[in-house]
Amino acid sequence: MLLRMSTLFLRTLREDPADAEVPSHKLLVRAGYVRRAAPGVYSWLPLGWHVFRNVERVVREEMDRSGAQEVHFPALLPKEPYERTGRWTEYGDLLFRLQDRKGQDYLLGPTHEEMFTLLVKDLYSSYKDLPLSIYQIQVKYRDEARPRAGILRGREFVMKDSYSFDVDDAGLERSYRQHRDAYVRTFTRLGLDYTIVSAVSGAMGGSASEEFLAPCESGEDTFVRCSACDYAANVEAVETPVPEALPVEGLPAAHVEDTPATPTIQTLVDLLNGREDLRREDRDWTAADTLKNVVVRLRHPDGRVEALAVGLPGDREVDLKRLEAQVAPAEVEPFTEEDFGARPQLVKGYIGPGALGEDRPAGVRYLLDPRVVPGTRWVTGADAPGRHVVDLVAGRDFTGDGTVEAAEVRAGDPCPRCGGALEIARGIEIGHIFQLGRKYAEALDLKVLDENGKQVVVTMGSYGIGVSRAVAAVAEQTYDAQGLCWPREIAPADVHVVATGKDATVFEAAERLCADLEAGGARVLYDDRRGVSPGVKFKDSELIGVPSIVVVGKGLADGVVELKDRRTGEREQLPVEGAAGAVLAAVGLGQPSGAPEPA
Amino acid sequence: MLLRMSTLFLRTLREDPADAEVPSHKLLVRAGYVRRAAPGVYSWLPLGWHVFRNVERVVREEMDRSGAQEVHFPALLPKEPYERTGRWTEYGDLLFRLQDRKGQDYLLGPTHEEMFTLLVKDLYSSYKDLPLSIYQIQVKYRDEARPRAGILRGREFVMKDSYSFDVDDAGLERSYRQHRDAYVRTFTRLGLDYTIVSAVSGAMGGSASEEFLAPCESGEDTFVRCSACDYAANVEAVETPVPEALPVEGLPAAHVEDTPATPTIQTLVDLLNGREDLRREDRDWTAADTLKNVVVRLRHPDGRVEALAVGLPGDREVDLKRLEAQVAPAEVEPFTEEDFGARPQLVKGYIGPGALGEDRPAGVRYLLDPRVVPGTRWVTGADAPGRHVVDLVAGRDFTGDGTVEAAEVRAGDPCPRCGGALEIARGIEIGHIFQLGRKYAEALDLKVLDENGKQVVVTMGSYGIGVSRAVAAVAEQTYDAQGLCWPREIAPADVHVVATGKDATVFEAAERLCADLEAGGARVLYDDRRGVSPGVKFKDSELIGVPSIVVVGKGLADGVVELKDRRTGEREQLPVEGAAGAVLAAVGLGQPSGAPEPA
């Protein structure tokens, strides 16, 4: 492959595009890889398309190697299967819906569980047909509320999605492991630094689930990793280590105190610390001594609404994403003034054991943070304005309906695996693997006959890689101040030959070099533009980010060309005779047959 | 590549699918290549996807070889550019339209002239940047009224569309020629029998235009070819040879006759032949002596409606597709009773020189078939029920506003090039090349500076190949009574190895053969299913249509395997030792290194 910049459909830009926030977006537009067509919808220019197709090739090769079989579904899908699984409505505004000329409802597929399930049902009927893993590399559509970050989060994007079908849980576990291994190989080949984090499956339903995150500052996903062991989880999945229960015996009885003008936790803590009669020997009162009861509405898919009170230490906020992951598919909505009005027992700002105890109003659920174990002592509201209960003991004076992981995770929190300090990091979700289980097979009635001739529901896995997103993720992790900086496997070319100056011999030598490189199997980008200054050409080569740059220019008078490593900046003078062989060796392609030995 | 049928996601069917009419549709479903997901919307199974990707590869290679550069646009497109060119409304019901969550209008791209034009405008500004040819292989959407014939005419389909940009007509001619050559190479490699026919560009606007049609009975396109020379054209583009004008002198004057009870041309001809006073010496009256005036409504894109009368010989029908191609972008609608009511001069069934002469009603255009040259004599309506004019002479007694190619073309009509007899044939449109000209560049203001620093409008070409359709077209042209019959270049595999019987040695020998074939570079489909009868396996191999079939079975006792040519049915016994080498040689892949010489 030889791409000539004199005719390449490319214009590099000196300025960042106005709408770009993250580095990959700025650089991919400036270097002429992509262009915006509409909000969250991008066109690929030739250089970008080369990179995209390289990523696609790696993904395909590793999926094939894992034994998965490639198929291809339409993006335009009928409503009916998505109605049967409830996702036609569950997806809400995220779904692009449309009608055909006959008024039939269609959607643009955001993911294809339904269609794969129905196809397998169409073809297969016996346990002997399984296991099966099938995949596609295909365009997906999601009407994101705030499409941002260029191709990192578009509304039209390319995903590799695959689905496994097994007759039992052990089979699903094997299929899941095969996908996990394929993803490890894929992301390694793509040159991505990634972390595999535990995930809860959220709205997708199902059990085991892990995300592949590419750590980087522009990442939209916050995750947690242990500074001591290799534990990592997305924030939704972090489990709070449960402290041991404490003895209740000998603890003082709960007592209600007047606490005027304490609308916030800080004012309450200040008041407690100012009250001589409440002073404790060992330490001052802190927000962590208080128990905050936060009420929200839960809207269930069937339309049912209930109230949920979450009791958690007062030094922590409720993390809505964590809470939503716990209560999915129900959605969390704010508790309104009307909601309070309808339940006068719940005194805003002072909700306490009275309102949340045994006599609590019907339709109110009360879940506790896992740290609120029996024997812990709390200050909390006394169900009346300006009053709080002190020495309220969990397990003795109050209990919840269960626990919930709704409190924010903070850097320094203990690792649930080893107790070490957790760190908070940001990353881009580049892959996701799920043990879906039987949810879709049940909804769409996918059964096979087992060994005993009995109909059994198939168990499924669902696995995704963001193919177009991976292009941006690699760019995010590898760019530097000068521009993009591709790993060779997915770079638009192996070598960027830059001919500088006006001398015809320069262009002749560069042409010969390019021909030799191409003959040696290298993919070559050749800056053969006349009348463009060396400075502009060098800047463009840095911006475009091909891993090896060969400058054919002034050095030619001394019989040398310069080989530069785009990443390290290392330069090497090569005798022009034999330069092709040396360059090919440097890029791992050996040397063209018949070429002179590199000097 | 080695695909094992024991695990391949495939089920062949014995019965034709109920909704399938054409052979390729029946066979592609039966052989497990595609499955219907919704009307006109198909999923590709592994075998079909292999064929699709082979076709895609050939198309890509030949486009790249022609110097075109690959890009990739979204399918979800904003309304605005399509509004500027008028196609948002012109496309009518054919366009899938939708809104995003903010209520912005979008469409699913039916073709991408607008987007390519805008992208070039975005990047380029000088004649030095041109010529440019860019292409994509991408999903397209058209909401066909009657999706039929499986992937031959889907509502979601894959097209290679390219666009050329030139500064002048000579450049466009060169770009057009490059595409034409690339298409010839592409369709030849795909193993398609094709005819290049002249086309009128219809709704696309523009000038020179040719279609690549694959002749076959299931084709939706009717075209015309000369039995004597190499002239070929689609029906819309056939030009009627214009006869020489005849002398008017000495012809009798026109005379009106009572012709009661002549509502049809046949009744009129019968009446004429029965009237002694109208008898002609040389021959009987025929329908070809009558002039039929057919009135239709033309609806222009701006909403304006006019009446169009077409005068043509009474032995020919108006071909609506031909008429529509002539009047595009106006649309043809039937002339209603109300339309007649509003223009009482037009007497239905008896429209003649009075109503269509100089005093004809405002808003009525009168166009004549090219055969109606001056000096020809006609019988036509006399603008009153039951009355006709005889000896009405064109050019003397009536003239039109021009001519129009609206009459049906019939087998035996003279070739416009050589006068030979035309044949009518059917074909599948597999490619289309257009000289679009400046229509889109003007609408979207794509200009570049020319050599003199003057802004000039760019001239464009537009070129399409139906990639998914080509799969069906090849199937249509190559199938036989047993099933599909792929040319090797796009076949899902080079060799189909069929192991028959229950003997373990058979499967061992087949495994070894497959391994050797794979090592030799062959793509192998291996029927390794146990417990499936030889008959079923043979039937499946015929249905699936891999070009070479190797049977490893009973012959093994005599030390031979059988190589069968799927197309010709020719069989050859090969010694099992060296069989791989012989098979590889037969499929054009030479022999694996280290393999024994074929016997």
Image (tube, coloured by chain):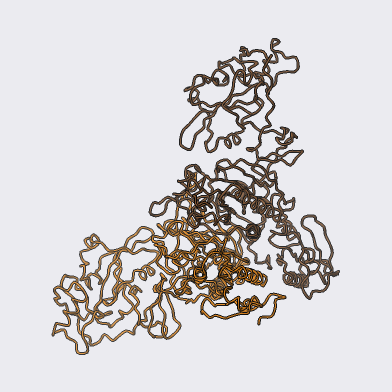
Chain colours: A orange, B brown
Q: Nearer the viewer, residue B386 or A207?
A: B386
Residue A58 image position (x, y, % from top left): 58, 70
Q: Is residue B307 above or below residue B119?
A: above
B390 lies left or right of B226: left
Q: Quadrant of the C terminus of chain B?
A: bottom right
- Which quadrant of the view contains residue B468? bottom right
- Which quadrant of the view contains residue B569? bottom right
Total tally of numbered discs in the picture:
0
In the image, farthest residue toward the top? B277
Give me the residue at 77% from left, 57% from top: B566
Q: Is residue A323 visible?
A: yes
Q: Is residue A335 above or below residue A516?
A: above
B283 lies left or right of A223: right
Q: Is residue A254 above or below residue B582?
A: below
- Which quadrant of the view contains residue B366? top right
Residue A239 image position (x, y, % from top left): 39, 77
Q: Quadrant of the N terminus of chain B?
A: bottom right
Residue B194 image position (x, y, % from top left): 70, 48
Q: Is residue B371 above or below residue B392?
A: below
Residue B166 image position (x, y, % from top left): 57, 51
Q: Nearer the viewer, residue A209 or B484?
A: B484
Q: Nearer the viewer, residue A526 or A500?
A: A500
Q: Is residue A470 visible?
A: no
Q: Nearer the viewer, residue A352 or B427?
A: B427
B160 lies left or right of B93: right
